[in-house]
Image: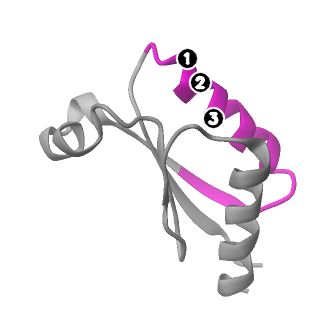
Amino acid sequence: MSRLRVTLYAKPDCPLCDELKADLAELQTEFALELTERNIEADEEDFRRYRYLIPVLDIEGGELLYPPHHWDTVRGALYSAWQKVQ
């Protein structure tokens, strides 16, 4: 079974980021996710690109997802990308 690579662009003390991380943890029971979290404060380019947009979700084989994040939208994007890597 392939793992779906997902990158979460976030920063510490971000309630929206924490909420999305919790949703992704729950969705791991449905999809085999390889989740990488990138702290935008640790990378100048990430900070420049995403400072006003976090949390941003980059799903392998899909487009970037920007807030607001809704459960059905995130799940649907994961499912679409999952179909491509199978």
Residue 3 on the magenta segment:
no
Q: Per the image, is 26 magenta?
A: yes
Disc 2 residue type (three-letter): Asp
Q: Is residue 18 above or below residue 56?
A: above
| Position in image of residue 53 (x %, y %) | 37, 37
Question: Which residue type carries mark 3?
Answer: Leu
Q: Which residue is label 3 attached to?
A: 20
Q: How far apart, in angstroms, are the residues tagged by discs 1 and 2?
A: 5 Å
- Check disc 3: other Cα within 10 Å, few if <14, some if 14-19, many if 20+: many
In percent of width and height, residue 45 lies at: 15, 46
For label 2, the SS is: helix
SS class of the residue under badge 3? helix
Residue 15: give its label.
1
Q: Which residue is mark 2?
A: 18
Q: Within 10 Å of the Cα at label 2, are there few (<14), some (14-19), or many (20+) other Cα atoms?
A: some
- Front position in the image: 76 or 82: 76
Residue pictured at 71% horizontal, 41% vertical = 70
Label pair 3/2, CB-CB below 8 angstroms = yes
Q: Judge left or right: residue 34 versus residue 32.
A: left
